[in-house]
Image (cartoon, rainbow, N blue to C red):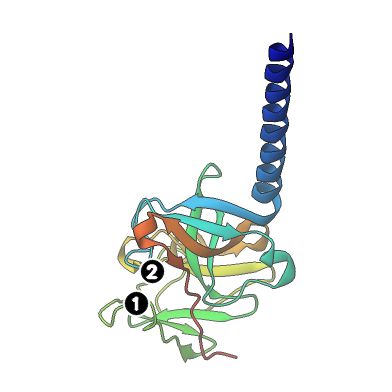
Amino acid sequence: MPFLRKIYAILIDLVETLVIAGAIFVVIYAFLFRPFQVNGQSMHPNYENGEYVLTNLITLRLKPVGRGDVVVFESPTNKEKDFIKRVIGIPEDEVMIKAGFVFVNDIKLDESEYLGPDVKTYAGAFIKEGEPQVVPPNSYFVLGDNRSFSSDSREWGFVASSKIIGKSFLVYWPITKSRLVKHAKYNIN
């Protein structure tokens, strides 16, 4: 009988440990951090297909999304998917695409921090060449870093703040490519 009691005690300890670990995971996943897998080439070369990014959920409650932030949000075209893009325009910004460049509030955006010098940005179905668009309240204008192969605000418009899941802050897989996510800084008022 002492042997059965030891096995019973071990099983109870194991179940308690699993329940506590599960509860901790649920709290972290629901309120703090969420993993996201990059699917596709829209953020190439900065984020590759198959990489895993950790997204911070709590910072949205503490600090608003800013220009240059890399965010994960619910796809405007398919609610089953999440997208990762870079925030270019915040509420009340005037965004325009002209001659292959992005302008925010009449200032040409310096994107050399994360784009090569040969990358051009062309208009789409939503934002037309040379026609400024004002970002509405509680919305954002986002672009993928791989401008030629990105479905983004140029095609389907602004992203509502309620659709943003979080700000990405760490690429953690594959481990050989782990790094902090760089959020661009723009000289725009």
Residue 176, by quadrant, is bottom left
Residue type of the residue flagged with mark 1: Leu
Query: How far apart, in angstroms, are the residues tagged by discs 1 and 2?
Result: 7 Å
* Dot label at residue 145: 2
**Secondary structure of the residue carrying numbered label 1:** loop
Q: Nearer the viewer, residue 120 or 169?
A: 169
**Residue 62, percent from left and from top:** 73, 70
Q: Nearer the viewer, residue 75 or 38?
A: 38
Q: Amino acid at mark 2?
A: Asp
Circle 2 crowding by C-alpha within 10 Å: few under 14, some 14–19, many from 20: many
Q: Secondary structure at mark 2?
A: loop
Q: Is residue 76 visible?
A: no
Q: Return the residue nearer the eye: 153 or 85.
A: 85
User: Which label was assigned to residue 115?
Assistant: 1
The numbered mark, 1 or 2, whose residue comes first in the sequence reads: 1
Which quadrant holds the C terminus? bottom right
- Report the quarter where the N terminus lies: top right
> Can residue 167 be seen in this snapshot?
yes
Residue 164, x across and y down, in percent = 61, 59
Q: Is residue 98 left or right of residue 69?
A: left
**Label pair 1/2, CB-CB below 8 angstroms:** yes
Residue farthest along the top direction in this orientation: 1
Q: Residue at x 59, y 52 (%)?
A: 34
Image check: 6 left or right of 89?
right
